[in-house]
Amino acid sequence: MISIRYKVLIAVIPLIFVSMILLTVISVGLARNGITKIATEFLGYKINEIIQKANNEMQNLKQSEFKDDPAFLEEVKKGIEEYARSITKKDIESVIAVDSNGIVRLSTDNFLPVGEEVRFFNKFNTGESNWIIFNVKGITKVGFYKYFAEWDYYFLLSVYSSIFYKDANTLFTNSIVILIVSISLMIVLIFFFINFMLQPLNLVVSTMKDIIKFNEMNKRVPIKYNDEIGELAFTFNNMLQELEGAYTQIKDYAYQSVLAQKKEERIKTMFQKYVPQDVVNEIVHNPDKALVGKNANITVLFSDIRSFTTISESMSPENLVDSLNRYFTIMVDIIYKRRGIIDKYIGDAIMAVFGAPKEYGDDVQQAVLSGIEMLENLDKFNQQQRDRGFKEFNIGIGINYGPVTVGNIGTVQKMDYTVIGDAVNLASRLEGLTKEYHTKLIISEGTFAAVKDFFYVREIDRVRVKGKLKPVKIFEPARKLNANQKKAWTLYNNGVRLFLERQWDESEKHFIKANDLLGEDFLCEKYIFDINEFKENPPDDDWDGTTTMTHK
């Protein structure tokens, strides 16, 4: 584990280091630029003096009777060479004259003798004067050149780079030393400062260890500074005070729980009101058959609150229980009103059955109406949640009609009136599919066959749920639709038919029109996406439109 003091050092040192490096680089760069500028003017001055001297000598030669004599011209050039030698520093500065072919014609030393070809000649620009950095014979030199058109020569005055930038290099070396010393001192100072700042935190940690080791709930952290760390210590002390009170309450609750056991029978009696009256009557009138099961076609409804973990984490236990009680009261009343019974609560989920233990003839229709009314009443419940500042509940509902085994299952001491079978599992899977298809209520193919004359219905998909080989059609029902929705659902269902017939273009047109009427409908957009995929990559010949689910 890396200590916080080292984390702070790791964060701060790079900032200081980069800042000082930048400052050093900028300082040295400015120094070099300043030296270069001054030296350029100085070297340029000497070159101009040489050029001016050569120009004057040529004017005198032209006015004399020897103007066409090559020997006198050579003498003039030698004189210029001597003049250049006289105004330069021996062993430091040197002057050469290079013709347009890059051949040295004049030289004040033997570093570049007369007649040698200059390899850096391409750095010169005809008719110009400029600063130049070049490397010759493994040595870097800097200088200033100027073109003398009369002789077609470039006069170059150069200096060794190491001598030219001696002061700048010394400045750079000194800056590096200062940088290293400064950073070292800063690290030491920052380390001591961090240790000083962390003393209150160390006290908090020490107090926590004592509480854990010795169970000293009455211990408190001394507050030394009126800053954020002091506020932390103050808050920590308040927390300890609350924990101390909670610890006392826990002991009281333990005592109360012993007393609560005496009320168990009364509580059991209270919860009997949640047992359906039909089940109670059957057990009372036929006690010998209470454990006998039977096979029957019934309707199973599963309802589940989505993202319940997130909701529970955002609410206190008291508010969460209150919200759940109000929610279950609303939903269970609807199910009871539609002659359904609550099979069980599975956490925040509800499992209800219709058509058992007593059949009424319209149980499937009543189950679908229950699902629709549960969603309608959920809006009223969520308005109450918003008014109280609590999170809203979103639910998914799956309904399936099919054969199950129904009866009282268990022992003489404890039994449950419940239903089991594949039809139950499918209802649970349908509830899970509501999240996949972004809808709130899904019914199975068997349910659709029983209620298609009583509701508006559109086919969602053909799915093979996890754990099953045989695919099933799934549908979304609605009790009422407006004119646009009716038209859209008709277009949608025709689009599904064309989709299964592989008439991609016609099917896509239907879904686009339906989507325009419904306004960004997920199912329409899903089919449009699938159609475009199949246009690019047609399905196999045995494709029947089934979607296989890999998870529950």
Image: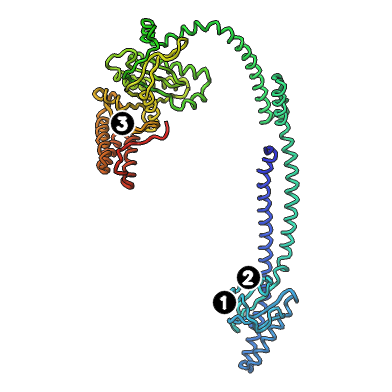
Between disc 3 and disc 1, the foreground one is 3
Q: Position of residue 91 (x, y in %)?
A: 75, 75
Give the residue pinned by disc 3: 473
User: How far apart in space, not on screen, are marks 3 and 2 (Cα)?
Assistant: 85 Å
Quadrant including the C terminus: top left
Q: Position of residue 24 (x, y in %)?
A: 69, 55
Q: Is residue 488 left or right of residue 111?
A: left
Q: Amino acid at mark 3?
A: Lys
Give the residue pinned by disc 2: 131
Q: Secondary structure at mark 3?
A: strand
Q: Amino acid at mark 2?
A: Trp
Q: Secondary structure at mark 2?
A: strand
Marks 3 and 1: CB-CB under 8 Å?
A: no
Q: Is residue 173 left or right of residue 356?
A: right
**Badge 3, how many Cα within 10 Å: few under 14, some, many 20+?**
some
Give the residue pinned by disc 1: 127
Most foreground residue, 488 or 85 = 488
